[in-house]
Image: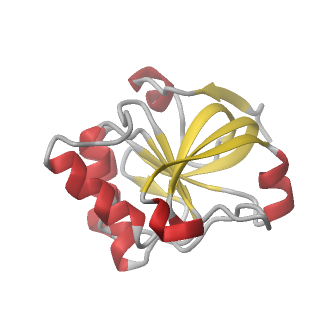
Amino acid sequence: MGKVKELKTPLTNSDIENLQVGDRITLTGQILTGRDAALPRLVKLIENGESPVVVEGAAIMHTAVSQAGIAPTSSNKTEIEGSIPPLSEAGVKMHIGKGALSPPTQESLEKQGSIFVVTPPAAALLTSRMTSSEVVAFPEEGIEALHRLEVKDFPGIVAVAHGKSIY
């Protein structure tokens, strides 16, 4: 196994260009979270020029945030996967979740210079890497609101990059 690559947010084009499918990473800095309810709403706000957050160089994790912690939801749900291309186009560099993405979504990631990362399936591990959490939009969605997390050494594996997939 190769060395773990350490990344910090906001992510740059060169951060993404230097990653390959199968690379193990850790991520430090801020990540955004959202699921079925929040991500399509965020896309609409971005399209209207009203984004509540800066998405350029951002990492977004497909999860809810609750007292029980965080763990990825299936990224290939229609509402979530449908948000990946427009969020990548808006500047999101890394999408974090689980599950195989469709070929058109993989092509969109390649076109926009973004990647998809899967995480170890251990909510306790992921939660232990979270140092703070703040609701930044859609508080009425409860645990599915858009959050900004502060993370340190957040683990992941590149699953889709540069037109290639581990699936």
Q: Residue 42 at what x, y percent from top left?
A: 32, 55
Question: Can you give x and y, in whole percent of width and height, for residue 25 in the image?
Answer: 68, 38
Residues 115 and 28: in front is 28
Image quarter where the N terminus lies is: top right
Residue found 55% across the figure and 61% down from its top: 166
* Horizontal side, residue 156 vs residue 123: left or right: left
Residue 110 appears at what percent x and percent y? Answer: 32, 46
Residue 141 in sight here: yes
Q: Is residue 108 depicted above or below 103 in this figure?
A: above
**Residue furthest left in the image:** 48
Residue at x-position 70% and y-position 65%: 66
Q: Is residue 145 above or below residue 156?
A: below
- Front residue of 11 and 29: 29
The residue nearer to you, when weighing 69 against 76, is: 69
- Residue 80's quadrant in the figure? bottom left
Single out the residue that lies furthest toward the bottom: 77
Tell me the quarter of the picture where residue 142 sits: bottom right
On the question of residue 122 being in view, the answer is no
Q: Nearer the viewer, residue 136 or 117?
A: 136
**Vertical placement of residue 130 versus 5, above or below:** below
Please report the residue visible at 33 percent of the width from the left and 50 percent of the height from the top: 109
Residue 92 in the image: state x and y as whole percent: 38, 41
Q: Residue at x 37, y 37 (%)?
A: 55
The reply, left or right, for residue 27 in relation to residue 139 is: right
Left or right, 23 with reference to 144? right
Q: Is residue 103 left or right of residue 11?
A: left
